[in-house]
Amino acid sequence: MLSVRNLCKSFSGPREKIVLRDIGFELAAGDFIAVMGESGIGKSTLLNLIAGLDRADSGQVLFEGADLCALDDDALTLLRRKHMGFVFQAFHVLPYLTVEQNVALPLALNGVDGATMRARVAAMLEAVKLGDRGKSLPRELSGGEMQRVAIARALAHGPRLVFADEPTGNLDPESAREVLGLLRGCVKGEGAAVILVTHSAAAASSADRTYVLTQGGLRPV
């Protein structure tokens, strides 16, 4: 599904900073991988490059045969909308929308009809154990519940690839374990692949395999 080849990224300034050098790995449908590394090492930058939110200096990101580095911004936006899902540390649940409306957003953006949307939202909320909270507003939820809403929203439109950037960083250990279990179960059930970025060994243990990102590159552990 995904092939990252010789990916390089640097940032200019008084002294050029090389963030990523010759990064490469493969990801198949159903894979759940974790990328660990120190804060500031470039984990989020790597996700942004793979998702087409930032541009690499060199290298390739091949998603189901398409080179994302060669696509223009409009094509990348459309590809993300249809085929990618995102779960963030800060939840990014919209405060003025109900739980149901938050989960429905990616379906609405993809033009899904109302009946199909309602059925899919209900199914996703049941999957993350929030079937009775659809009418609630985010301010009525705990941090763990908001992250479960974010997972349901990320998977609602059936993405092929899911990015999880420190999704347990704002959660207590018990909530973190529950959220990671739900994320893994939902992703596997949907047949998607996931890239989890984390500094937590406990979070990484939920993955099928783990990589460590250092200044020397990306290596499996």
Image (cartoon, grey):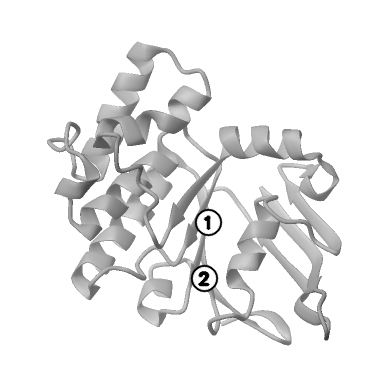
User: Disc 2 vs disc 1: Cβ atoms closer than 8 Å?
Assistant: yes
The number of callouts visible is 2
Can you name the residue that lies furthest to the front here? 14
Q: Which residue is mark 2?
A: 209
- Left or right of 88 on screen, residue 126: left
Q: Earlier in the sequence, mark 2 or mark 1?
A: 1
Q: Position of residue 33 (x, y in %)?
A: 52, 64
Residue located 62% across and 81% down the image: 41
Residue located 49% across and 49% down the image: 86
Q: Amino acid at mark 1?
A: Asp
- Where disc 2 sits, the SS reads strand
Can you name the residue that lies furthest to the left here? 132
User: In the figure, 120 relative to 20: above or below?
Assistant: above
Q: CA distance from mark 2 to mark 1?
A: 9 Å
Which of these two is toward me, 151 or 72? 72
User: In the figure, 100 relative to 179: above or below?
Assistant: above
Residue 143: image quadrant is bottom left
Residue located 52% across and 39% down the image: 159
Q: Position of residue 63 (x, y in %)?
A: 71, 46
- Where disc 1 sits, the SS reads loop
Residue located 46% across and 32% down the image: 106
Q: Amino acid at mark 2?
A: Arg
Q: Position of residue 59 (x, y in %)?
A: 85, 62
Local packing at callout 1 (Cα closer than 10 Å; few below 14, some 14-19, many 20+) is many
Task: Determine which of the numbered discs, if any, sits on residue 31 in the image.
Answer: 1
Task: Determine which of the numbered discs, if any, sits on residue 176 in the image.
Answer: none
Q: Position of residue 111 (x, y in %)?
A: 51, 18
